[in-house]
Amino acid sequence: MNDQPDLRQFLDEFSNFSDGGAVVPMAGSALKVPTIGQVLEIAGSGSRVVMDTATLVELQGHEDQSIAMSGQVGSQIKMKVGISWLIANVRTLRAGDEPGTVIANVDFLGEGSERSDGGLGHFRRGVTRYPIPGVAVLPVTTDDMRAIFAADDSPHVEIGTVYPTDDIRGTLYVDPMLSKHFAILGSTGTGKSTSVALILHRISELSPEGHIVMIDPHGEYSAAFKSCGELFNVDNLQLPYWLLNFEEHCEVLLTTDGAERQRDADILAKVLLAARTKSKSSEQYGRVTVDSPIPYLLTDLNQILVAEMGKLDRAGDTTPYQRLKNKLDEIRADPRYSFMFSGMLVGDTMASFIGKLFRLPSNGRPISIVDVSGVPSEVTSVVVSVLARMVFDYAIWSRTEAQRPLLLVCEEAHRYVPKDENASGQAVRKILERIAKEGRKYGVSLGLITQRPSDLAEGVLSQCGTIISMRLNNDRDQACVRAAMPEGARGFLDAIPALRNRECIVCGEGVAIPIRVRFDDLEPEKRPASSDPSFAASWREVGDEAGIIGRTVKRWRGHGR
């Protein structure tokens, strides 16, 4: 493109837009890019531009899809500053003061150098020089879009195509995305589970020796990763009860509140420490605390409890001891808890459990799917707490070893890090909040997946450096995401309620600039078991109802067996 014309000349051309528009040829290119407006006002992160309505309408039939989108909310425009092209995103539109014009608020995304053919090259995020009012505004071409979204040599995965193009690939940079945590948001039915599976499959293919642990509360993802992941549920998880720390023991064994709960907790701390130190293996570790993950026998805990109770003079003093003993007996006798409170789990299996769960080594299966759908609801949060804490504690205590970063993916995150600070399950809330704040230092990445971001604890979402937002129907959820996203992505946010299924807005550390992406289709064998049933079709079918009920009741009573 030739040097910028002076402001008077530009305004003369601008006044003739309704007669066909001024065309600025790009040197060495067959494509002619029309000038669509001029800069009106400049601010630090964005500005206002005025555009000609007739030119925008005329461009809607252009063969270049990106140019055809010119001026629409969510589209990009460019302007020349020195020898650089400045790229901005259209956030809002309104009718201009002059007939036949529209005023747009735009957010600056970044800048690139001018190639010899007048196109865009070497795009980078951020702005070093701002335009002055009166500078010409041009539409961004598909070639420009290719330059903007061209992936560099950093490790990355392709997840779909950039809107509104058909062939420009949307990429996520793996290291920035994982090191600063990420969140995947979307209302029920938007294709969230399939999109999560797609991203994790792509990361697993890029890093076949990875270490990913996924908490799956609905049993959806086992079907998606049966060929490349290790699957755990209540039948084979074998989570040793002695791995629980004191706070997690309290959540399982204490049934009281207030002052009574504190008294029960003091008793539990005393007998638990005695049971841990009674173990022969405890001698080699020196100082042992109630939190030390040292094996102990449940029978020892029970005997110490009874012995302590026998030392008391008054019968009324035994009540808290009896409460603890009754709860312990109840859990030991309940087959639903056998995956955790079983006499078979007393051996020191900590090393093998960690190796198996964290995929060390991965043996070509870099992801562990932990299906907690069969876990009794009273201890689900405790199980998630133990798994998350094991990830974090392992990372802390292995700092002097060769680095093996871990990724913890938590589906239905609003269950475990709720906004309500008085909700049950404080242990899991504390550890997930700590991972969100400190995990990066120790090589632990957190992936949060939720359909209700407004129900997440304050600050957790803002700790996620990359946000992948699918359609959100609720106003509170949209406001929550808007507050967590950077200023430059605000124009994309307005499109969140209008996104189609399997479409998303990505912004933050994992992408060069905020993008709107249509996810790739995933092979049927890699999809999670999360498809919605067809009521209309299913309600036309009949037959074997008695057999269905009989088999269901059997599985129900046998807890899935």
Image (spheres, rainbow, N blue to C red):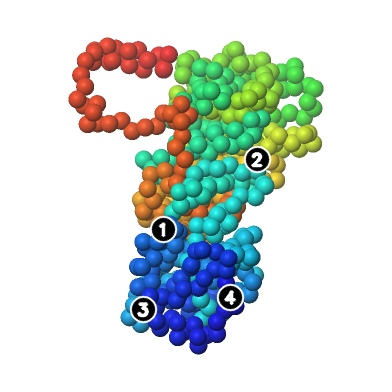
Residue 206 location in percent, x, y?
62, 36
Q: Which amino acid does label 1 sit on?
A: Glu
> Helix, strand or loop at disc 3?
helix
Quadrant of the image for the N terminus? bottom right
Nearest to viewer (mark 3 / mark 2): 3
Q: What residue type is labelled 3?
A: Asp
For mark 4, what is the residue?
Answer: 2
Q: Earlier in the sequence, mark 4 or mark 1?
A: 4
Within 10 Å of disc 3 (Cα), the crowding (few <14, some 14-19, many 20+) is few
486, 483: nearer the viewer: 486
Question: Which residue lies at the image location 49% right of the left edge and 82% below the top edge?
Answer: 10
Q: Distance between the residues labelled 4 and 2?
A: 51 Å
Q: Using the image, tell me which numbered label, if any, was put on residue 19.
A: 3
Q: What residue type is labelled 4?
A: Asn
For mark 2, what is the residue?
Answer: 444
In the rendered image, is residue 442 in sight?
Answer: yes
- Residue 401, picture quadrant: top right
Q: Which of marks 3 and 2 is nearer the N terminus?
A: 3
Within 10 Å of disc 1 (Cα), the crowding (few <14, some 14-19, many 20+) is few
Q: Which amino acid does label 2 sit on?
A: Val
Q: Distance between the residues labelled 4 and 1?
A: 24 Å
> Relative to 402, is 314 on the left or the right?
left
Q: Earlier in the sequence, mark 4 or mark 3?
A: 4
> Helix, strand or loop at disc 4?
loop
For mark 1, what is the residue?
Answer: 63
Question: Which residue lies at the image location 48% right of the left edge and 77% below the top edge?
Answer: 38
129, 258: nearer the viewer: 129
Q: Using the image, tell me which numbered label, if any, was put on residue 219.
A: none
